Amino acid sequence: MTTKKKEKNYFKPKELKCKATGEEGFDPDFLALLNEIRHECGFSFPLSSAYRSPQHPIEARKERLGAHTYGKAVDILANGENALEIIRVAQKHGIKRIGVQQKGGGRFIHLDVCTEEEGFPPAIWSY
């Protein structure tokens, strides 16, 4: 008889909810992948943003809703070597959409797994 190893969850449900509305909508498959990336990196991942409802102020201003509204995106507070390691490990795990904010306050790495079929082509960008 084989038993499936329970994956460690590094993220609290509160971290994954919309900060503006409190709604849940984070994609469980993306959460599993994010946990794998976090485990491999070996350091904590404070999230500044995860799921955002369409009513979230950032999303409400957009002409087209972003990846966060699909529950398939996070912004991880990180800079320097940690930011570089997150990018390296994320790419190793197949992440093809990465945003980089590494100047001023609030430095972060955006990761998302939205697809071309959803209207999000592979890309890397800076803020």
Image: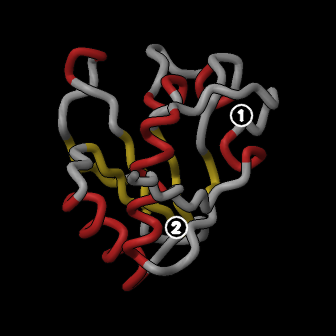
Residue 97 numbered mark, or none:
none
Residue 54 higher or lower than 100, as above or below: above
Q: Which residue is mark 2?
A: 107
The residue positioned 45% from the left and 53% from the top of the image is: 3
At a point 61% along the width and 57% down the height, the residue shown is 47
Residue occupying the point 26% across, 26% down: 115
What's the amino acid at mark 2?
Answer: Arg
Could you say where residue 85 lies in the image, as x and y percent from the top left? Answer: 33, 76
Question: What colour scheme does the image use?
Answer: secondary structure
Q: Residues within 10 Å of mark 2 (few under 14, many from 20)?
A: some
Q: Residue furthest front?
A: 1
Mark 2 or mark 1: name the one nearer the start of the chain. 1
The x, y position of residue 78, in whole percent, is 50, 72
Tell me the quarter of the picture where residue 123 sits: top left
Question: Label 1, on which residue?
Answer: 18
Q: Residue at x 70, y 18 (%)?
A: 55
| Placement of 72 over or under 65, stated as above or below | below
Name the spot of residue 11 as percent of width and height, x first: 64, 56
Q: Quadrant of residue 23?
A: top right
